[in-house]
Amino acid sequence: MILEFLAIQVQLWELSLAAVVMAEETQMFEQDIVVVGAGIAGLSTALGLHRLGIQSVVLESSDSLRMTGFALTMWRNAWRALDALGIGHILRNKSVQIQGFNFLPMNSNQPTSDQSDIKSPDQEIRCVKRRDLLDTLSKELPEGTIRYSSRIISIEQSGSHKLVHLADGSIFRTKVLIGCDGINSMVAKWLGLQSPVSAGRAAIRGFVDYFNGGHGFEPKFHGFFGGGVRYGFIPCDEKSIYWFCTFTPSLFEYDENDGDPVKMKQFVMKNILNVPKRASDIVERTKLDSISCAQLKLRSPWNILVGNLSRNGVCVAGDALHPMTPDIGQGGCSALEDSIVLARCLGQAALVRDETRLERGVQKYAEERRWRSFCLISAAYVVGMLQESNNKAVTWLRKMVVSRYTGAALLRISEFDFGKLSVS
């Protein structure tokens, strides 16, 4: 009996010692605003807050900036946001301004009715390399704002605060938690938002550099639609081009999960045989390490309308809020919109002497972005369906009506006024 008693006491002592050691090893950090994810939405939100004199920390799971993807089409709304953040001039020096649209049917070299120029100087469109955008955003942030190798494993409510548990055992205690952690957002799941659904389509994307003499293409948005495929390209500068090919895998018996870049390249080349030779040569000369394929997903628009976009000081932005198909080119642009609205709402809330002020600021942001997010997701899905469909009725509608107004419609979407980065 005595031996058993001593053994139990030793076990209890060992457990107590382990608890003490664990407590000593666990680091608890206090931070009013924590941003999850160092992508476009996360970095621009942190920079917007910084411009208003508000400190935040960005938790990034990888050990450096993630450069997945090659480039983004930045429309007028994006440039307004970038100017508000104070970095528009930097990125303009690294890109060319797009002068118009050149949309053609996939099965003909003759242009349809939309071969138009952009006449207004205010309608600024440029294709920006993703690396340039992320590098510029990160360099404008104070040193130490981004904490790399910080993978979140759980989120816990603790009174009016949130406890963000990291894989390394450390914990961030925060009043506001902003999920900018992409399409598979853990923060969105914590809010109770439904998982994004498949659009039934996939996208193969590529990027090519012309080191000798440049590519020679006009600075226009070039697109070829129909036959179940949508192919397009846009110059980033005089020596580089970003291209894409979206399609419905089930119609072509294509496995979008096959990561073989050789097969991706062969698939695109096979389905753009009828485009001008110069246009198909872009894909032909693309290096295999500059091609990728991804299944297209979107959040249900109805989930945006009725779901919890914020709760107890927690919200989401960018792809974590409104994942959409790329057919209107507003994924990155709308993420920048989010950052300005969110920073402004939190900046205005910070001026109020109230314990729940930041939570109310988050709620205001969520309501401001609800309808805009719904409209963008819905518009992108419909535009993609119309442009790719091989249905005879839809094909006639696309040639006779839709193609005439595609460029103008995309410009109107970018006209949205999301306000200024100001607390006044």
Image: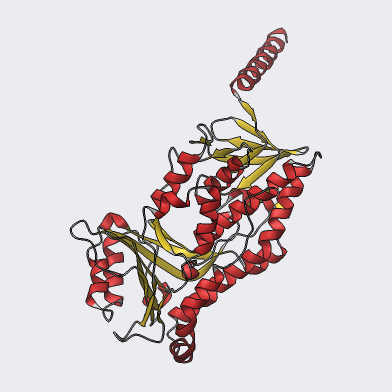
Q: Extreme left residue here?
A: 212
Question: On screen, 281 above or below 356?
Answer: below
Residue at image coords 72%, 59%: 367
Residue at image coords 71%, 52%: 310
Q: Position of residue 105 (x, y in %)?
A: 36, 84
Q: Residue furthest top?
A: 2
Above/below status of 152 relative to 334: above
Q: How many marks?
A: 0
Q: Measured from the top left, where is residue 386 in percent x and y? A: 49, 81
Going by the image, does 420 lie left or right of 86? right
The answer, for residue 216, to whether it is visible in the render is yes
Residue located at (69% from left, 47% from top) = 423
> In this view of the protein, which residue sits in the foreground, 342 or 105?
342
User: Quadrant of the rendered structure where residue 305 is?
Assistant: bottom right
In which quadrant will I find the N terminus? top right
Q: Nearer the viewer, residue 148 or 91?
A: 91
Reply above or below: 418 against 104.
Answer: above
Q: Position of residue 85 (x, y in %)?
A: 54, 48
**In this image, 246 relative to 317: left or right?**
left
| Drawn side of residue 40 relative to residue 339, left or right | left
Give the camera-side residue of 12 and 170. 170
Q: Is residue 36 visible?
A: no
Q: Is residue 416 left or right of residue 287?
A: right
Residue 390 position in % (x across, y down): 42, 85
Q: Quadrant of residue 242?
A: bottom left
Report the residue at 34% width, 85% height from top.
111
Q: Which color scheme does this rendered protein use? A: secondary structure
